[in-house]
Image: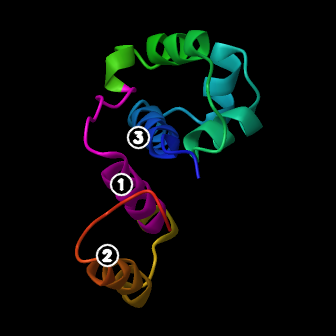
């Protein structure tokens, strides 16, 4: 798993939130920035990386600053980033409580330490 995959999920969530606040459909935003509706869907779901120039166009189209779209840098250890990614994915998939419990049990089995090795 890409240690930065959580960034694309955060960008996608923020884009969707801002697009919906402006009352724009995925199709109308796509037309405004020169992308397809499918590309917007994939960006919003964190499946596709948006080129920086397109992020600027999207920010302008949504009448916001690009820094409102890009999440702030985090500097925790790599294991922490991995946990954040797992929790982001878990919340996106709306995991059931027992699945989340398994993640936390695995952490406890490692003595509460989070590292990059599975």
Q: Secondary structure at mark 1?
A: helix
Colour approach in the figure: rainbow
Task: Give whichever of discs 1 and 3 has the lower sequence position.
Answer: 3
**Residue depth check, mark 1 versus mark 3: number of the one nearer the observer:** 1
Task: Give whichever of discs 2 and 1 has the lower sequence position.
Answer: 1
Q: Please tell me which residue lies in front, 66 or 99.
A: 99
Cα distance between the residues tagged 1 and 3: 28 Å
Cα distance between the residues tagged 2 and 1: 11 Å
Q: What is the x, y in percent for residue 101?
A: 34, 85
Image vertical order of residue 63 relative to residue 24, above or below: above
Q: Residues within 10 Å of mark 1 (few under 14, many from 20)?
A: some
Residues drawn in magenta: 69-90
Can see residue 49? yes
Q: Please tell me which residue lies in front, 1 or 115.
A: 115
Q: Residue placed at 43% from the left, 54% from the top? A: 85
Q: Please tell me which residue lies in front, 87 or 17.
A: 87
- Asked if the residues shown at circle 2 and circle 3 are in contact, with their CB atoms under 8 angstroms apart, the answer is no
Q: What is the x, y in percent for residue 35?
A: 73, 22
The residue where tag 1 is placed is: 79
Label disc, if present, on residue 94 of the rendered structure: none
Cα distance between the residues tagged 2 and 3: 32 Å
Can see residue 64? no
The residue where tag 3 is placed is: 17
Q: Residue placed at 40% from the left, 90% from the top? A: 98
The residue where tag 2 is placed is: 107
Q: Secondary structure at mark 3?
A: helix
Image vertical order of residue 27 relative to residue 115, above or below: above
Q: Residue placed at 28% from the left, 29% from the top? A: 72
Residue furthest toward the bottom?
A: 98
Task: Give whichever of discs 2 and 3 has the lower sequence position.
Answer: 3
């Amino acid at each position: 798993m890409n240690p930065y995959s959580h960034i694309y999920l955060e960008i996608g969530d923020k884009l969707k939130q801002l697009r919906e606040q402006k009352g724009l459909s995925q199709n109308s935003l796509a037309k405004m920035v020169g992308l397809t509706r499918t590309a917007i869907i994939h960006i919003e779901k964190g499946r596709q990386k948006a080129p920086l120039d397109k992020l600027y166009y999207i920010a302008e189209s949504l009448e916001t600053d690009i820094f409102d779209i890009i999440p702030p840098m985090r500097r925790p250890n790599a294991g922490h980033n991995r946990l954040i990614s797992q929790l982001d994915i878990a919340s996106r998939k709306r995991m059931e409580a027992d699945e989340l419990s398994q993640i936390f049990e695995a952490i406890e089995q490692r003595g509460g330490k989070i590292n990059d090795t599975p």
